[in-house]
Image: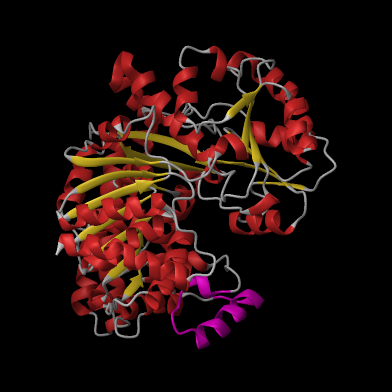
Amino acid sequence: MGKRNLDRLPAIFNILSKAFPNYEDRPQQREMAEEVLRCFDNNKGLLIEAGTGVGKSFAYLIPAILSRRKTIISTSSLALQDQLVGKDLVFLQKALPQKFSFGILKGKNNYVCLKREREYTGTGNSYERFRGWLAKTKTGQMAELPFIPEFWPEVCGDPQDCNGRKCPFYVPCFYYRHYRGLHKKDILVVNHHLLIHDLLSDFNILPFHEQLVIDEAAEVEDVISRVLGSRLTYSRTMWLLYRLKGLKIIVDHLFADVKAFFDRGDIDSGPVFPIPAHVTELLRGLREKFAVDKTLSTLDKQRKSAADDEIKDRIETTIGFLKSFAGDVDDFIGQADANKVYYMEVSGTTLEFKSNLVECQIPFQILIDKYDSTIMTSATLTSGGNFDFLKKRLGIQDFEEKVIGSPFDYKKQSLLYIDKNLPKPDRANEKIFQQESLGVMEDLISASRGRTLVLFTSYRHLHFAAENITIPYPFKSQGDMPPARLIEWFKDTPDSVLFATATFWQGVDIKGDKLSLVIIDKLPFSSPADPLYQERCKRLGKRWFYDLALPSAILRLRQGFGRLIRGRNEYGVVAILDRRVVESSYGPTILSSLQEVNITHSVEDVRQFFA
């Protein structure tokens, strides 16, 4: 079967070129498809980097279809899920002669929960609009809503408040009605969070586990770390109190205590690691006030005597929620798991407790062992020209490896500007760097006539630039509106400028001359204040910089670089305002990891490029 499938690939791509008017025949895409199909056929693992423009979605979807085996496709975002299902797979289903089916699955919080909606008592125009939508919707998906109501967390699905088949609303449930048909599908598109929650559930969420494709695979470690960690928040605790009160458990005396405990204006806004002993003692006192064992006993008696199915379901899910809550509280009090880092920080005005898994090799191995074949891909998987960083972080062994370059001519289509005159952007020079880099940004944005994405490594620098920059072009900052709307604003507003950080370093796809300049303020090293990063560095000892700090910064830098050129006929400039790229001992390693491109240190050369 394997050889026959490979022989069919050329004919499949010929069909695409005829069926898709704008389809570009790319040897790189065919090469990737062959590698993926070969590994599927031989039950192998594959690490494959596919440069921007390769068309990696088709290059893994077509082999999945030809293999005739059930395949999970995991992406890093809901937006990419929607693109695969709403565009790519729809096209392939129409164009290819082989019949196949596909579906999409998102987390329960993306669907309205009929039980929780029934419990919620809302008022006002927003609630009336929501009720009107609910009366008509066939899917119950949040993505269908023309607006996101502020009370959505109160009415959406919640795994901890879900009783599955025992729920009285199981039959009409939007999530499960959709879920019940997925085991028949050939291809199922999920996101990384759902993939790891499936691992956490002992593989009881996803309906099949034969072949796995992980797109944007460099994100998986962070997702494992978060999902296998825990969170204890004010909102979670208050939700539990209101649920207990609704079940006639006496908790009125706890509301003020909970508010006083979490409302901690005396704690620095940055993360505190580890959690201090005096705080864990306060947390222990709060747990005692919940009288968990006594409350569970009372709830169990109520459950046994409940005649109403809805009340019984509410009690059963509350018992599960309370046990989970108490387990997490005990975990934060003891901070005893050696493979977790525990910390607290202020979010808004309230205290949050968080834990993250430090090393993710073991859970990742359990994940991939469940599948016959695993393909890990992205436009940026290598650091320093190899996969060593990713392999070490995830404990990957015996995977095939392949790097497929971009079809774009970066020497012709782009220019890399590196500033050598600004102060080194370290902590001692932070204020002067912010001030002096502002003028360089203004000159560069003027040269490109707007059309600029400025990527910052900190919100502090972003806010400073947004408040003090003087440019004759419309601009907005991350946080001014939701990310998707910001990107639409940027696309629809001529000569606009967007200041962003964090999520905008990846996944932003702006084609054409709407985006001609990407400015990166400094090398995207992780913050030394991040407790997870601190702990990982500590465990690496003297190797922390070259085994973690540098390779992770290179991956993030390559992601930022990749925002610029998205097509063969696009031209633009990437500007890095960090002199360490050319002055440090590790600078050559960074430059060798980027695309082959002409480098300049002159703003005048940038003006000439855009002339």
| Total numbered labels placed on residues in the image | 0
Which residue appears at 45% of the width and 78% of the height? 140
Taking the spot 65% from the left edge, 31% from the top edge, the residue there is 461
Q: Position of residue 313 (x, y in %)?
A: 28, 75
Which residue appears at 22% of the width and 69% of the height?
Answer: 207
Residue 526's x, y, as percent?
A: 47, 29
Q: Is residue 115 above or below residue 54?
A: below
Front-most of 160 and 96? 96
Relative to 585, is 12 above or below? below
Decide whether residue 470 is among the magenta residues: no
Left or right for 373, reference 443: left
Above or below, comparing residue 126 to residue 216 in the picture: below
Determine the residue positioned at 45% across, 85% down: 138
Q: Is residue 238 visible?
A: yes
Q: In front here: 37 or 88?
A: 37
167 in relation to 423, above or below: below
Q: Determine the image quadrant of residue 442.
A: top right
User: Looking at this view, is 582 or 32 the one in front?
Assistant: 32
Identify the coloring. secondary structure
**Residue 519 in view:** no
| Residue furthest to the bottom | 136
Q: Quadrant of the N terminus?
A: bottom left
Please provide percent x and percent y for residue 15. 39, 71
> The magenta stretch spans which residues?
122-145
Can you say which quadrant of the picture contains the C terminus? Answer: top right
**Front-most of residues 465 and 414:** 414
Q: Is-magenta flag for residue 143?
A: yes
Relative image position of residue 227 (x, y in whole percent)? 32, 49
Provide the major secondary structure of the magenta segment.
helix
The answer to which quarter of the image holds residue 371 is bottom left
